[in-house]
Image (cartoon, helix red, strand yellow):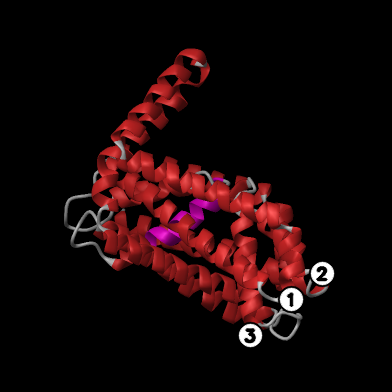
């Protein structure tokens, strides 16, 4: 019992250190976000947080639906808990720990049934990520095609046609490779052979290559059965699409009447910006979306109007859910002691 209590104390200490380190790392970004939040009204803040809450509830339901592909008595509350806790770990680990946290809490889901196997949890997390990327690309590409039809936005679309094509191509390649690794044993074996060759050529990275090979094997072994549940996968994509639309509704609401774009134009442009920001590497995605958003939206409104909007969006979809996730994690830890 003393050992268990000691481990819990160490875990809490490490969690606190991670939180402090992340706050120091993101200090400038958070100060900017807070400055942006102070420029909006209480009503705008409240509605933005409400939309974000609905969005993360859908994220939780998407995770719940993924759990349903493996077990029959999953609970929606488990998925919602995991969705918020993952955002807490995304913030505290600079974006690197979100997937690991999802795998952990899928594996340790607190019900009377048997836990989801670690391998299955890993596969579910990877597939969940791919369903999310499919929804992001679908909305982003749809937004581009719709905006290209309008004389008001065609010029911007032509200006960034190369980047849009590149973003769609990169996302499509990632999805295609993922599906091939999941569904084709030959492709998985070929990828494993390439990793074995890399282990010989770059021994300093052996642990990473072996980990990738293990994940590919897991994906190929379990991915078929999960992806084979087509209705369930379509359901997850639709839920993710709904979540993204709620995300995009935040800047659309905040910019209503303040830009030359109509409601649909603002919604689709946000979808395009969100898709392109996903291919720019940045810790937790911080900075990339702000850059693309301001690049696109300042063509239709002034920077003084656009800047507070994206800063409030970041607060509602990044800091707020992470804070909720941290609170839920504390409550969970207290109840489990």
Position of residue 235 relative to residue 67, above or below, is: below
Element marked by disc 1: helix
Nearer to the camera, 331 or 260: 260
Q: Residue at x 34, y 66 (%)?
A: 235
- Evaluate whether residue 32 shows in this view: no
**Quadrant where the N terminus is found in the figure:** top left
Report the residue marked by disc 1: 151
Which segment did they paint magenta?
Answer: 80-93
Q: Quadrant of residue 256 in the image?
A: bottom right
Horizontal and vertical percent position of residue 258: 76, 82
Is 83 left, or right, of 230 in this rendering?
right
Q: Earlier in the sequence, mark 1 or mark 3?
A: 3
The label on residue 43 is: 3
Q: CA distance from mark 3 to mark 2?
A: 22 Å
Is 210 left, or right, of 36 in this rendering?
left
Report the residue marked by disc 2: 303
Q: Is residue 273 magenta?
A: no
Q: CA distance from mark 1 to mark 3?
A: 34 Å
């Amino acid at each position: 019992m003393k050992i268990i209590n000691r481990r819990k104390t160490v875990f809490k200490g490490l969690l606190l250190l991670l939180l402090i380190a992340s706050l120091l790392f993101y200090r400038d970004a958070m100060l900017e976000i807070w400055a942006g939040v102070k420029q909006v009204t209480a009503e705008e803040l409240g509605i933005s947080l409400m939309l974000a809450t609905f969005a993360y509830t859908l994220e939780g339901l998407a995770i719940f639906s993924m759990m349903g592909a493996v077990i029959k008595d999953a609970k929606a509350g488990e998925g919602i808990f995991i969705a918020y806790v993952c955002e807490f770990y995304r913030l505290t680990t600079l974006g690197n720990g979100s997937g690991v946290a999802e795998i952990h809490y899928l594996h340790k889901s607190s019900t009377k049934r048997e836990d989801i196997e670690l391998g299955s949890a890993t596969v579910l997390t990877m597939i969940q990520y791919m369903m999310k990327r499919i929804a992001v690309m679908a909305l982003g590409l749809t937004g581009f095609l719709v905006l290209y039809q309008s004389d008001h936005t065609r010029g911007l679309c032509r200006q960034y046609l190369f980047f849009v094509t590149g973003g769609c191509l990169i996302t499509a390649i990632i999805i295609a490779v993922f599906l091939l690794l999941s569904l084709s044993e030959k492709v998985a074996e070929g990828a494993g052979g390439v990793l074995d060759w890399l282990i010989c050529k770059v021994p300093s990275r052996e642990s990473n290559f072996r980990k990738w090979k293990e994940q590919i094997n897991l994906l190929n072994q379990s991915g078929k059965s999960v992806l084979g549940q087509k209705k369930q996968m379509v359901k997850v994509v639709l839920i993710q699409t709904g979540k993204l639309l709620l995300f995009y509704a935040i800047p659309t609401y905040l910019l209503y009447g303040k830009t030359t774009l109509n409601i649909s134009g603002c919604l689709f442009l946000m979808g395009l910006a969100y898709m392109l920001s996903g291919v720019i590497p940045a810790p937790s995605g911080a900075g990339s979306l702000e850059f693309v958003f301001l690049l696109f939206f300042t063509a239709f409104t002034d920077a003084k109007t656009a800047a507070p909007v994206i800063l409030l969006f970041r607060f509602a979809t990044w800091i707020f859910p992470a804070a909720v996730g941290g609170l839920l994690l504390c409550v969970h830890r207290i109840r489990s002691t």
